[in-house]
Image (tube, grey):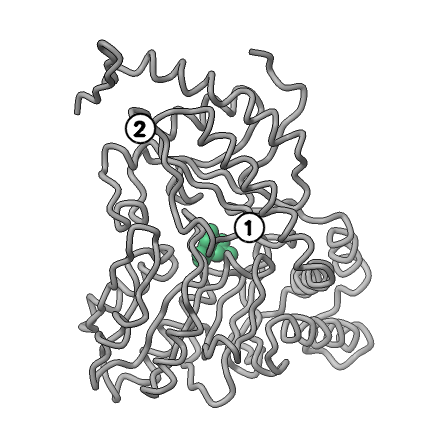
């Protein structure tokens, strides 16, 4: 097998490269429009102008009002503000929160903290394709429920949840609904009114903008107690000097991606299906995880029986191809993904999972290179895997 002469990036669910047009405006904002948006002089006024125009761009992308957009440092902060902010604001009404078993740690960890403080959290199961059943949300609601938080698209296997149906249920029951849309923003159309969500988290670095910027949509009339205090920026809801370069980059990336969202996502999902079909055909003992249709355009998640996902990642890395063994923040640990376990995949097999996440700059040629080398890598790893045995045409996995 030949080593590749250049690197190929297939880990867009972890992060994306900044688009050159975006890097250009970020640079300009850092060097030319560097004023503090709270100051009244020309530098401050320019910065404020950029800030408010960027807010309009983000709002337009999700069909909200500009004053419903709160800029943050990213998806993790948006989720934390939403969860702690609602829990604090509505604690007199109740202490029950509904979520799913497959949320990102940026939702699960704040919920664990609330659990320690006496909140009751219901973790809804998913089916074998990774979908939450809206009926389960309805059944879990009690007179103490103050918040439902369910992600739009899963970061591990890409399933897109029936957020509009869940939103209808929360609306009918007068319960606040938060949605972590970090993975789906700019990969699926998002209309906060059609989805019936009250809060929605998004992040810049997943959409070809810099790291360290994100936003939280907060529907007018939704009370959220601030979690960061200081100079009163963002109308007192999130203090701290605004990250104008990051915010401008986030808005610019949004404008570029929104201009041909359907065409781009259609092309990426076509490439994704081409890759999926080839792998399923050329390699044995492999399953494709997550709903095959309702999923992120770039996400492919496979389980290769009798292997460790981290070994496949390392081997591909030697050949210059970057993929992930799970979700980014967990890939250093050789541990089965909680999401895949929640879908009922047995732990021994779930460990042999990889995520290949394509972006719009990937080409058919790059995908073909992966298709050409992966079967050989899988077969060579299986031949050397100590727990894998083959006898008389049958395969055994010695647990
Ligand atoms: C679904 C989901 N939510 C939240 C986050 C955290 O976002 P950020 O890295 O911007 O803090 C991620 C990042 O991987 C994610 O995939």
Of the 4 image quadrants, the one containing the N terminus is top right
Q: Earlier in the sequence, mark 2 or mark 1?
A: 1
Based on the displayed image, in which of its 4 quarters is residue 273 positioned?
A: top right
Residue 16 — which label? none
Q: Quadrant of the C terminus?
A: top left
Between residue 55 and residue 62, name the one nearer to us.
Answer: 62
Q: How many marks?
A: 2
Q: In this rendered view, identify the residue nearer to me: 229 or 55.
A: 55
Q: Which residue is mark 2?
A: 305
- Residue under the point 45% across and 39% down: 355
Left or right: residue 5 versus residue 233 is: right
For mark 1, give the secondary structure: loop
What x and y, as percent, mark residue 119? 21, 73
Left or right position of 26 against 196: right
Distance, label 2 to label 1, CA atoms, is: 25 Å
Q: How many C-alpha atoms fall within 10 Å of the one at disc 1: few (<14), some, or many (≥20)?
A: many
The residue where tag 1 is placed is: 297
> Residue 141 in the image: x percent, y percent?
24, 79
Front position in the image: 392 or 13: 392
């Amino acid at each position: 097998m030949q080593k590749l002469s250049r690197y190929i990036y297939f880990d867009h669910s972890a992060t994306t490269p900044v688009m050159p047009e975006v890097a250009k405006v970020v640079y300009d904002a850092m060097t030319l429009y560097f004023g503090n948006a709270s100051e009244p002089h020309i530098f401050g006024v320019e910065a404020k102008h950029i800030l408010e125009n960027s807010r309009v761009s983000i709002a337009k992308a999700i069909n909200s009002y500009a004053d419903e957009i709160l800029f943050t440092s990213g998806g993790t902060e948006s989720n934390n503000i939403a969860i702690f902010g609602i829990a604090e604001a509505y604690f007199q009404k109740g202490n029950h929160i509904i979520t799913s078993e497959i949320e990102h740690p940026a939702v699960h960890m704040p919920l664990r903290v609330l659990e320690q403080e006496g909140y009751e959290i219901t973790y809804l199961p998913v089916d074998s394709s990774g979908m939450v059943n809206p009926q389960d949300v309805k059944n879990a609601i009690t007179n103490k429920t103050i918040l439902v938080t369910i992600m739009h698209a899963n970061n591990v296997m890409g399933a897109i949840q029936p957020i509009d149906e869940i939103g209808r249920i929360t609306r009918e029951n007068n319960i606040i609904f938060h949605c972590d849309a970090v993975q789906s923003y700019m990969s699926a159309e998002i209309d906060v009114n059609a989805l019936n969500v009250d809060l929605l988290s998004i992040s810049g670095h997943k959409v070809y903008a810099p790291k360290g910027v994100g936003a939280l949509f907060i529907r007018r009339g939704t009370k959220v107690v601030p979690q960061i205090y200081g100079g009163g920026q963002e109308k007192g809801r999130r203090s701290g000097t605004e990250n104008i370069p990051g915010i401008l980059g986030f808005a610019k990336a949004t404008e570029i991606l929104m201009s041909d969202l359907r065409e781009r996502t259609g092309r990426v999902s076509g490439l994704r299906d081409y890759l999926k079909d080839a792998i399923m055909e050329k390699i044995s003992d492999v399953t494709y995880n997550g709903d095959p249709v309702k999923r992120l355009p770039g996400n492919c998640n496979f389980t290769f029986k009798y292997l460790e996902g981290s070994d496949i990642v390392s081997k591909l890395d030697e050949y210059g191809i970057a993929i992930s063994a799970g979700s980014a923040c967990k890939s250093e640990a050789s541990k089965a993904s909680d999401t895949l376990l929640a879908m009922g995949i047995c732990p021994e097999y779930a460990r042999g999972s990889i995520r290949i996440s394509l972006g719009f700059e990937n080409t058919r040629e790059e995908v073909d290179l992966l298709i050409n080398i992966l079967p050989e890598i899988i077969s060579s790893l299986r031949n050397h895997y100590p727990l894998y045995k083959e006898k008389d045409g049958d395969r055994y996995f010695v647990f």
